[in-house]
Amino acid sequence: MINSQVTILQQAEAYLQSVTSCQYTKIVQPLFISSAGAHMRHILDHYNALISGMNEQFIDYDKRSRGGDIEIDPGAALAEIAKIKKFLLSLSSSQLNMPMSLSTEVSVTEKQVEIVTTTLARELVFAGSHAIHHFAMIDQIAKAQQSSTPEQFGIAPATATFLRSEKCAH
């Protein structure tokens, strides 16, 4: 569980080390409404919601730090990832399986907040999947900028397994 999260964050690090500040902050219109940096900040907000939620046993993904250094500075994002990895590597199995509450808005037509019971392990699965989904968006932004991303960036684990099996079949 933890190793998979670290691997996902290492993919983010590889991207951040390869991108220019201009590529990171550019909004490629009309194809996209946000920059790669905004996607990265959004990803890290979710991991930070887990860190914040540990003390109160209450996770709220809707509390986000829109804007800020992480959105405009790849170096700031790298520093934040280092903090998140340190947190992940400090977790025990009892912390991973501890019941917590999760608060999240569920409607796009009106404010409707639901609170459900979950565990940190379950939410890490979500955060990793969520990160990969946004990596796929960042990959498309990079392609629109005629730049590249690390291999398997934005590829879901099940898709990677499928692609490996297809490669073996041919």
Image: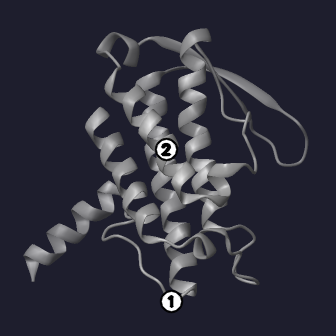
Kind of residue at disc 2: Ala
Q: Residue 96 in the image: x percent, y percent?
A: 38, 19
Tell me where residue 131 appears, x and y as whole percent: 49, 51
**Residue drawn at the location 56% of the way across and 85% of the way down:** 145
Residue 17 to residue 120: above or below: below
Q: Position of residue 111 (x, y in %)?
A: 88, 36
Residue underneath mark 2 = 79
User: Which labelled disc corresponds to residue 73?
Assistant: none
User: Which quarter of the figure is the C terminus placed in?
Assistant: bottom left
Quick one: label 1, few (<14), some, or many (20+) residues within 10 Å?
few
Residue 48: image quadrant is top right
Q: Tell which circle, 2 or 1, labels the residue nearer the N-terminal end.
A: 2
Residue situated in front as seen by the camera: 33 or 117: 33
Residue closest to the eye, 107 or 60:
60
The residue that label 1 is drawn on is 146
Q: Which residue is drawn at the image coordinates 49% and 67% (left, top)? A: 136
